[in-house]
Amino acid sequence: MPRSARVKAESGFYHVVAKGSGGQNLFEGPADYQAFLGFLSQACEKHGVAVIAFCLMTNHVHLLVEDPDGNLSQMMQSLMTSYAQRFNSTGGHIGHVFQQRFKSQPVEDDAYLLQAARYIHNNPARAGICAAWEYRWSSYREYVGRSEVAKTSLLLDMCGGREGFVAFSAGAQDGSYRFSQRTRVSDAEAQEIARAVLGGLDPIDLKALGRERRNALLFDLKEAGLSVRQIERLTGIGRGTIAKASQS
């Protein structure tokens, strides 16, 4: 089946998500996260793309980028190829590191741009890991400190400075922003992805875990592309609990 064409943003801004192949982890330690950010900076500079916000989770990556020249695909190909080669070489891995096609969603207005950044920075909190300001591998700290990878000036100007950015980031999300998941995962693929995401843990055993750990893993399953109904069938956990744990 031919792949559908990417939707082009009139604004030039995109929310991008790249996931580990089959739900596998993309990062195994601090050196991996640091290497990815280095490759990201190099690829963006080469292709004229600016990083507005980022968050590197264990098995997926969120990026908010500005792509004025239409080079997003080339930039992401360069980034993923460079990182995958290093990841396989240093970690002794074989095979695909990323799902073959990253996902992108246009961000067409200022309000949505701010919401996208907040959504990205709040990934660790939604996963039950920690608050946005405590997470090491996102651009949140660059917004309240020194910028190294992200172009922070645009959003800081929109928020009226760092204090305004912090206040907006801490504000309640109204649920109007979410990343569109267009690709349907088959039930057979869902079982394989669940095994990879859970690191050998039987999905049915999630019910016996503590609430924080359980919800973090439910969030990871949803982010890996599984539907609420698929997670319910695999884990035996009610869809209300799953929806709350994976809430955007």
Image: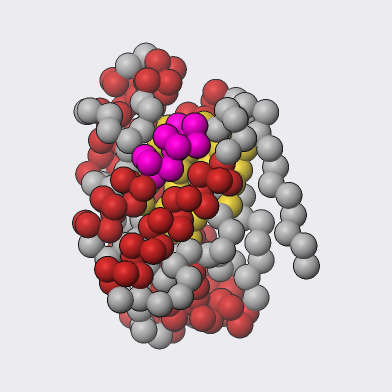
Q: Name the residue at 36% across, 84% down.
A: 200
Left of 69 or right of it: where is 1? right
Kindly indicate the quadrant of the structure image that contains residue 87.
bottom left
Instruction: Find residue 32 and report its horizontal and vertical position in percent.
Output: 27, 58
List the single residue furthest toward the front.
Answer: 46
Q: Name the residue at 55% across, 23% down.
A: 110
* Vertical order, 58 against 120 (above or below): below
Kindly indicate the quadrant of the structure image that contains residue 147.
top left
Left of 135 or right of it: where is 182? right
List the single residue furthest toward the right.
Answer: 1
Instruction: Find residue 85 and report its horizontal and vertical position in percent.
Output: 39, 64
* Vertical order, 70 against 241 (above or below): above
For this rendering, which residue is in front, 170 or 189?
189
Asked whether the viewer can see residue 215, the reply is no
Q: Name the residue at 36% across, 40% down.
A: 41
* Vertical order, 131 against 140 (above or below): below
Residues drawn in magenta: 40-51
Q: Name the residue at 74% across, 54% down.
A: 4
